[in-house]
Image (tube, rainbow, N blue to C red):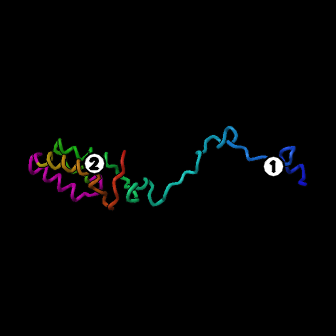
Amino acid sequence: MTDPSQSGSPSGDPQPASFPPPAGYPPPGYPPYPMYVDPSAPYGRHPITGEPYSDKSKVVAGLLQLLGLFGLVGIGRIYLGETAFGIAQLVVGLVTCGIGAVIWGIVDAVLILTDKVRDQYGRPLRDGT
């Protein structure tokens, strides 16, 4: 027979583990599960390709590119790290007195917002701000 001090019930059967955990579990201030951040992808990964997201936001880049409506095209590209391309857009906007800036700004903003443009390192732009 087993030692009665080791059994949890009078019949000698060990008591099952208490489930659900007692109130207050996990302790206050701790997440309910371990938080894991991939050091090679601090902003997450693309759900289909698995590529790490850029630190640049496509929403911010697209809105900055829409400044082309006011003649300041290229700011979104400069934000993405493509300074030569952004400066070229600024020059074209100045030379065409803003007409080219409006058209190019709208087209480029649509390309940025529809995931057709990547950052300077080739990573997909992340959603949100």
- Counting residues from the start of the chain, the first of labels 1 and 2 encountered is 1
Horizontal and vertical percent for residue 44?
A: 43, 54
Asked if residue 37 can be seen in this view, the reply is yes
Query: Quick check: 36 left or right of 99?
Result: right
**Residue at (38% x, 59% y) in the render:** 49
Which range is magenta? 78-99
Q: Nearer the viewer, residue 37 or 11?
A: 11
Q: Secondary structure at mark 2?
A: helix
Q: Secondary structure at mark 1?
A: loop
Q: Tell me the mark number nearer the camera, choosing from 1 and 2.
A: 1
Horizontal and vertical percent for residue 8?
A: 83, 46
- Give the position of the C terminus as an image quadrant: top left
Label at residue 14: 1
Residue at the limit of the structure toward the left, as seen here: 96
Label at residue 113: 2
Whether residue 57 is in magenta: the answer is no
Q: Nearer the viewer, residue 2 or 123?
A: 2
Tag 1: amino acid: Pro
Query: Quick check: 24 left or right of 80?
Result: right
Tag 2: amino acid: Leu
Task: Give the Cα distance between marks 1 and 2.
Answer: 61 Å
Q: Nearer the viewer, residue 87 or 76?
A: 76
Few, some or many C-alpha atoms within 10 Å of disc 2 (few <14, some 14-19, many ≥20)?
some
